[in-house]
Image: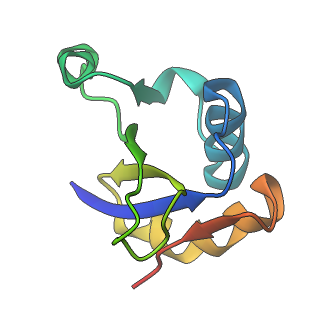
Amino acid sequence: MDSREIFSKERVKEKDIIKAVKTVLDINKEDILFVLDSDDWLKRNNRPIVVEFKGILDEDDEYPGYYYYDLFFADDSILKKLKEFNKVLGDNVIVTIN
């Protein structure tokens, strides 16, 4: 699985981030796993998309005070669609593309 980071000034609700992933990637909600705790990975069951909440970044990080998520995916064609997350989630969200 490949991954990209998502940073947000405000915490994004689980339902909102799942809706954004569903909308941008045009996939079923059942194909997305939202992980709050490392044990949640056990529920993956071959889902192609996993969004993991990592916490709030420290003062010495690139985006201090931002909420940090990892978006894991199995299909590299998803990379082309990642720019669209800002349109769905708003300007307070940064998605690493490279």
Whether residue 49 is visible to the viewer of this picture, yes or no, is yes
Instruction: Look at 21% across and 54% down and name the residue there.
Output: 1
Q: Is residue 88 left or right of residue 78?
A: right
Q: Residue 4's quadrant in the figure? A: bottom left
Q: Residue at x 54, y 76 (%)?
A: 80
Q: Residue at x 26, y 14 (%)?
A: 43
Query: Is there any visible trace of residue 50 in the rendered image?
Result: no
Q: Position of residue 63 (x, y in %)?
A: 49, 71
Residue at the spot 61% in from the left edge and 27% down from the top edge: 14
Which percent across, then down, holds residue 53? 41, 38
- 56 displayed left or right of 86: left
Number of marks in picture: 0
- Closer to us: 3 or 30: 3
Q: Is residue 19 above or below residue 3?
A: above
Quarter holding the C terminus is bottom left
For residue 23, above or below residue 8: above
